């Protein structure tokens, strides 16, 4: 997505991060809309793709980093920089499990959308989104562990 430091700082706004939770359901609905509007379904798909790009650029940098979702976004960046450090080693199995669950959910979601199977689509959404949200909580805890150990954490 080509996010630079300024874009990441804006994405740390809880309004940005929480509104991104809408992306998978909106994308699923846009793809499913081919049933109702045929080839015109490309328009809502393009709109969702535009939303994916625009969202982290739309909101201002948050005034504070106290919000849970702000900590989750910053924690993701901390994990990318320090996920191999011993202070967060105990989080690695959970991160792998939740990343796998989200990935599996994405595969199930895609299958549901291809076959227009509502049960698979909803199961895929639950797995992908549930795994991601739980992972965000792990990122908050990992960020706290890194800070407690004196590691540099991302600031905005």
Image (tube, rainbow, N blue to C red):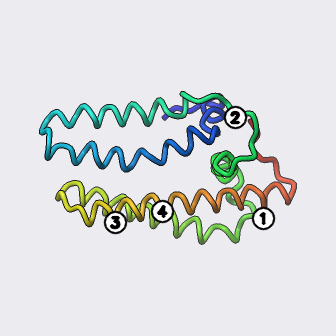
* Disc 1 and disc 3 in contact, CB within 8 angstroms: no
Q: Which mark is residue 132?
A: none
Mark 3 element type: helix
Q: Quadrant of residue 123?
A: bottom left
* Residue at x-position 35% and y-position 44%: 26
* Earlier sequence position, callout 4 versus callout 2: 2
Residue at mark 4: 130
Of pointers 3 and 2, the one earlier in the residue sequence: 2
The Cα atoms of the two marked residues, 2 and 1, are separated by 28 Å
Observer-nearest of 88 and 74: 74
Earlier along the polypeptide chain: callout 4 or callout 3? 3
As drawn, the label of residue 87 is 1
Residue of label 2: 62
Distance between the alpha carbons at the discs numbered 3 and 2: 34 Å
Residue 145: % across, % down? 78, 61
Q: Secondary structure at mark 1?
A: helix
Residue 125 in the image, given as x and y percentages of width and height: 37, 59
């Amino acid at each position: 997505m080509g996010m630079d430091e300024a874009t990441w700082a804006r994405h740390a706004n809880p309004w940005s991060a929480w509104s991104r939770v809408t992306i998978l359901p909106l994308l699923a609905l846009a793809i499913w809309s081919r049933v109702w509007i045929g080839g015109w379904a490309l328009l809502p798909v393009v709109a969702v793709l535009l939303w994916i790009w625009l969202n982290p650029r739309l909101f201002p940098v948050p005034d504070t980093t106290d919000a849970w979702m702000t900590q989750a976004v910053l924690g993701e960046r901390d994990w990318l920089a320090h996920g191999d450090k011993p202070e967060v080693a105990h989080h690695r199995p959970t991160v792998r499990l939740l990343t796998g669950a989200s990935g599996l959910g994405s595969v199930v979601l895609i299958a549901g959308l291809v076959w227009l199977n509502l049960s698979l689509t909803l199961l895929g959404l639950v797995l992908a989104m549930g795994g991601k949200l739980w992972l965000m909580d792990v990122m908050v805890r990992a960020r706290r562990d890194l800070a407690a150990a004196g590691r540099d954490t991302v600031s905005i």
